[in-house]
Amino acid sequence: MTNLGGTTIASPGRMTMDGPPTPTVKTRLCNKYNTAEGCKWGDKCHFAHGEKELGKPKLMGSYMPPPMGPRPTGHFAPPPMASPGLATPASFGASATAKISVDASLAGGIIGRGGVNTKQISRVTGAKLAIRDHESDTSLKNIELEGTFDQIRNASAMVSELIVSISGNAPPQAKNPAGGTHRGGRTGSNFKTKMCENFAKGSCSFGDKCHFAHGDNELRKPAAA
């Protein structure tokens, strides 16, 4: 570095160039452009290829301007590779459906009075529950569940427990005089001798036809053997 009168001048051997070279102007026509062989320099030629290029700035050297468009943010990273045994985000918590076929006579008890049972299952598990007709068997009903795998598993368990509870409190079968069996009759010896568990929960679907007592006022003593 040389200091002359307070002005600092860099020595020629240490001068650096920051940015592109100073542009110049095409002031003369290329004498090769209109010949048979043509100009081998093309767009890089320092002379004008026609009057339309006269006075047009040109860049000396091999400097190339940066491409136009958005610049990288500096935070680019390749997408993470999925590790073996780990679920990908697309499959984690994916929605699924399941179908359970039950006897049509159980549908009312599963739904409950005013839909109390199905609403509770949906509220507790988060799964959507609907009861529809079976595709081919009129004696069956389909319980359709929709949600994640965990929601469906929990809802299926609650439905199974509900079916067991309903079956345990179902009106007992009594033989009729012809030797057959029927439900809903009041000739059984155990008629209203026990309290209805579903009634206490507010989910008995048999109403007045239930063979179990809906309160102490309906409770009867067992018949003598």
Image (spheres, helix red, strand yellow):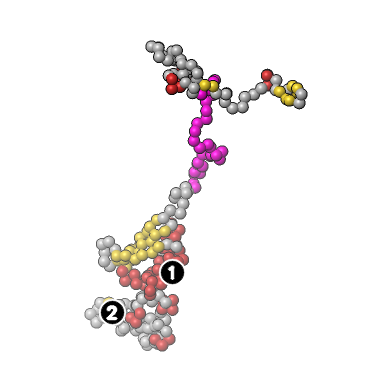
Specify the quadrant that holds the N terminus.
Answer: top right
Whole-percent x, y for residue 79 in the image: 50, 41
Residue extending furthest toward the top: 36
- The secondary structure making up most of the magenta span is loop
Residue extending furthest toward the left: 178
Q: Three-letter amino acid code at disc 1? A: Gln
- Residue drawn at x 46%, y 15% is 30
Report helix, strand or loop for mark 2.
strand
| Relative side of 11 to 177, left or right | right
Whole-percent x, y for residue 219 in the image: 40, 86
Cα distance in 3D space between marks 2 and 1:
36 Å
Front residue of 12/147: it is 12
- Residue 175 numbered tag: 2
For label 2, the crowd category at 10 Å Cα-Cα, with few meaning under 14, some 14 to 19 and many 20 or more, is some
Q: Three-letter amino acid code at disc 2? A: Lys
- Residue drawn at x 71%, y 23% is 9
Q: Which residue is mark 1?
A: 120
Q: Was residue 154 drawn as part of the magenta stretch in this picture?
A: no
Please provide the residue range marked out in magenta: 57-86
- Residue drawn at x 45%, y 63% is 125
Front residue of 138/39: it is 39
Front residue of 37/182: it is 37
Q: Is residue 191 visible?
A: yes
